[in-house]
Amino acid sequence: MPRATTLTPTQIRARRTARGLSQATLADRVGVTQATISNWESGRSSPSAEQTATLRDALGPVPTGEQGGGSAAPSDGGYGDWLSATRVQQGLSRAQLAARSGVSAPQIWNIETGATGNPRSSTRTKLERALGVSPPEALVEAVRQEAEISGVGQFVDFDPHDESDFPSEPGVYVFYDISDRPVYVGQSGDIRRRIKGDHLEKFWYRPPIVEKASYVRVEDQTLRRQLEDTLIKFMKSNAVINQRQVAR
């Protein structure tokens, strides 16, 4: 049997999304677990030649025009699935989309691979304007509900190395390292000002120690401090920077 050409992570994700398949559905067709599909799409692992052949049978070619110019996505897919499929359908590289949108290529990569699950609304607006299409309302609502913390607000991701993406809002924020381990928890009445004033020039505030960041908007200062203290205590030694009391 001739060796099947390996599909790239982007091709797998784009073809699955274009055909309206969830990761779980594709996994069932290929005979692997949903986690395996997720790993293939994020580039953490690659399918074997035999699995690639089965993948190609399950996915087929990208259906032209089937998704209305890239404006649709499977109901259980994420925003990153929609973004990746739409970008690929329009023939754009991440660098080209970054140049069009003003969103950095690393941030686009994080969104498409799911590392950034709920990007800020301003980031989504830039990307959607650059692409000329918007995701389905059902997808937007699903992302919002998944990120909602009952009684508090939405858990939103932002790029810690792009100052234009820093939130100028009151809240509690977390920095994560390259392996998604939380390394710092903070709170502020203005997160952008806190980051620029207290963190930006610190020796630890660079990859791979700080790769990603998330925050939840919290207006009340007392509640912010309580949440910050609770998170630090829960994470114990995992909150490396907090434990060493650096730049608190």
Image (cartoon, helix red, strand yellow):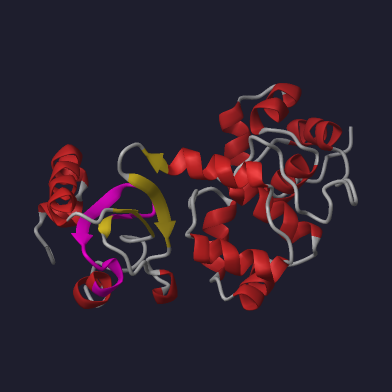
Left or right for 2, reference 45: right
Looking at the rendered image, the quarter that the C terminus falls into is bottom left
Please state the horizontal and vertical placement of residue 236, each as a whole percent of the image.
15, 41
Left or right for 246, reference 41: left
Please state the horizontal and vertical placement of residue 132, each as a whole percent of the image.
74, 66
Which residue is rendered at x = 49% and y = 39% of the image? 145
Please state the horizontal and vertical placement of residue 153, each as a whole percent of the image.
35, 46
Which residue is rendered at x = 57% and y = 39% of the image? 39
Total tally of numbered discs in the picture = 0
Which residue is rendered at x = 38% and y = 60% of the image? 211
Q: Looking at the picture, does residue 169 appear above or below residue 145? A: below
- Is 188 magenta? The answer is yes
- Locate residue 237: give its quadrant: top left
Q: Is residue 41 shown to the viewer in this render? A: no
Please state the horizontal and vertical placement of residue 192, each as a whole percent of the image.
30, 71
- Locate residue 169: give its quadrant: bottom left
Which of the two residues, 33 or 153, is positioned nearer the viewer here? 153
Q: Looking at the picture, does residue 23 appear above or below residue 224? A: above
Left or right for 129, reference 102: right
Which of the two residues, 27 or 21, is positioned nearer the viewer here? 21
Left or right for 83, reference 156: right
Which of the two residues, 3 or 28, is positioned nearer the viewer here? 28
Looking at the rendered image, the quarter that the N terminus falls into is top right
- Is 182 magenta? The answer is yes
Which residue is rendered at x = 20% and y = 49% of the image? 239
Q: Is residue 188 shown to the viewer in this render? A: yes
Magenta residues, start to end: 173-193
